[in-house]
């Protein structure tokens, strides 16, 4: 089939609201980020972590969106185990459909009681229920929607106790865990990344000074002393991991603040992240407001990954980082909910690009993720 005709056909289906399932096509990429209005600032480096701030003079209005932490904290969003009774606060006051299925490791139930679309990012952690879970993929939930199944992954291997509701944790798991959830979508690989610290193994030939400061042995000690149920949050807050994650975060934050304090007419909307000489990750948002909301927990996640990777002092180049702003040519998957969102994933070799587009109240790419796969 002709590619132009195929593109026209897919676009027409999206416009008609008919494309509500996963579709596979070939994407035509762009070699420049100029149309996005993005620009990289000089890199900020601390130990083996390098961060390139992404700035833009353009900004979308993202104030209509509700974030997961805000929704759970205010009670406007409810997440429960399957089988728990949920009442829907809708305009016509009808009760929601009741779920009679048993609790499931990889699926919860979510209700958005608010009048705002709810934004979910892959890797965001919710605490409680029978086990702590993380969101499986980026998604937008329409306001006032009926209770719906929510795909998740467990990050607390070993606990399955009483409890049905979840609360905000203000945590997003580090890139190795996010990658296994968002791309591989395998529960065992998610657990492996939690327990081992990183998907990247340290070469046996590395000098001792370059060894990861968080490793499987540290984490095993943390399980024995502080986190017997292997809770993600407790593992990475434990002194048994042998390193101060918060101290690392504070130093990077100071350097980041200095580097971005004198911007004129531009705003930080994202970052490109490198470990040693390898550009590995990027998170870019539609506005400074969204970036500011997620930045603290994203920075902590990048710090955990840096401490769990080999402590190599090579430095990634600006050109390497710039490539993470370009769109990929590769195999594309699309998931769309009419008038709510479109999720798009493009894979080209070891690179994966994921974009979450809002379709209401105005079309925009709310979040863009680029991953250099390590698994």
Image (cartoon, rainbow, N blue to C red):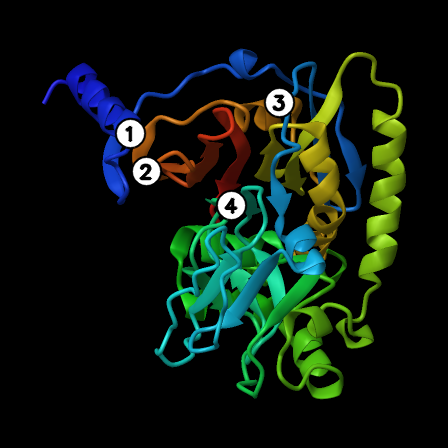
Mark 4 neighbour class, 10 Å CA radius: few under 14, some 14 to 19, many 20 or more: some
Please tell me in which quadrant of the rendered image residue 26 appears: top left
Q: Nearer the viewer, mark 1 or mark 2?
A: 1
The residue carrying mark 1 is 14
Mark 3 neighbour class, 10 Å CA radius: few under 14, some 14 to 19, many 20 or more: some
Q: Residue 70, how many percent across, how many down?
A: 69, 51
Q: Is residue 202 visible?
A: no
Cα separation between marks 4 and 3? 20 Å
**Rendered-image quadrant of the N terminus:** top left
Q: Earlier in the sequence, mark 3 or mark 1?
A: 1
The residue carrying mark 3 is 60
Q: Nearer the viewer, mark 4 or mark 3?
A: 4
The residue carrying mark 4 is 143
Label pair 1/2, CB-CB below 8 angstroms: yes
| Residue in view at x 20 percent, y 15 percent | 4
For this rendering, which residue is in front, 115 or 277? Answer: 115
Q: Is residue 117 visible?
A: yes
For this rendering, which residue is in front, 211 or 252? Answer: 252
Is residue 224 rendered to the left or right of residue 358?
Answer: right
**Rendered-image quadrant of the C terminus:** bottom left
Q: Nearer the viewer, mark 1 or mark 4?
A: 4
């Amino acid at each position: 089939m002709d590619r132009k005709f195929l593109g026209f056909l897919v676009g027409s289906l999206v416009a008609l609201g008919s494309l509500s399932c996963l579709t596979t096509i070939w994407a035509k990429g762009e070699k420049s980020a100029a149309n996005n209005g993005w620009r990289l600032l000089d890199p900020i480096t601390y130990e083996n972590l390098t961060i390139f701030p992404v700035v833009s003079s353009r900004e979308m209005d993202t104030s209509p969106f509700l974030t997961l932490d805000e929704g759970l904290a205010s009670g406007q969003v409810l997440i429960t185990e399957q089988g728990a009774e949920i009442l829907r606060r809708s305009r016509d006051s009808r009760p929601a459909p009741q779920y009679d299925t048993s609790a499931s490791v990889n699926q919860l139930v979510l209700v958005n009681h608010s009048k705002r679309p709810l934004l979910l990012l892959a890797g965001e952690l919710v605490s409680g229920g029978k086990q702590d879970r993380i969101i499986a993929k980026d998604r937008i939930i329409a306001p006032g929607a009926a209770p719906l199944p929510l795909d998740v992954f467990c990050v607390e291997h070993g606990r399955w106790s009483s409890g049905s509701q979840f609360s905000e944790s203000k945590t997003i798991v580090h890139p190795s865990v996010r990658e296994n959830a968002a791309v591989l979508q395998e529960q065992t690989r998610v657990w492996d990344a939690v327990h081992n610290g990183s998907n990247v193994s340290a070469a046996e030939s590395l000098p001792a000074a370059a060894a990861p400061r968080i490793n499987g042995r540290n984490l095993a000690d943390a399980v024995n002393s502080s986190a017997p149920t292997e809770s993600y949050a407790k593992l990475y807050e434990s002194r048994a991991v042998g390193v101060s994650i918060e101290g690392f975060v504070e130093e990077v934050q100071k350097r980041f603040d200095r580097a971005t304090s004198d911007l004129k007419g531009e705003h930080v909307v994202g970052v490109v992240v490198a470990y040693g000489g390898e550009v590995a990750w990027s998170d870019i948002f539609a506005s400074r407001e969204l970036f500011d909301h997620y930045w603290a927990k994203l920075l902590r996640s990048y710090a955990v990954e840096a401490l769990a990777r080999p402590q190599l002092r090579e430095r990634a180049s600006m050109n390497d980082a710039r490539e993470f702003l370009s769109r990929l040519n590769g195999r594309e998957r699309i998931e769309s909910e009419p008038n709510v969102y479109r999720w798009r994933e493009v894979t080209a070799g070891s690179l994966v690009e994921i974009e979450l587009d809002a379709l209401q109240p105005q079309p925009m790419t709310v979040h863009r993720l680029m991953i250099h796969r390590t698994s």
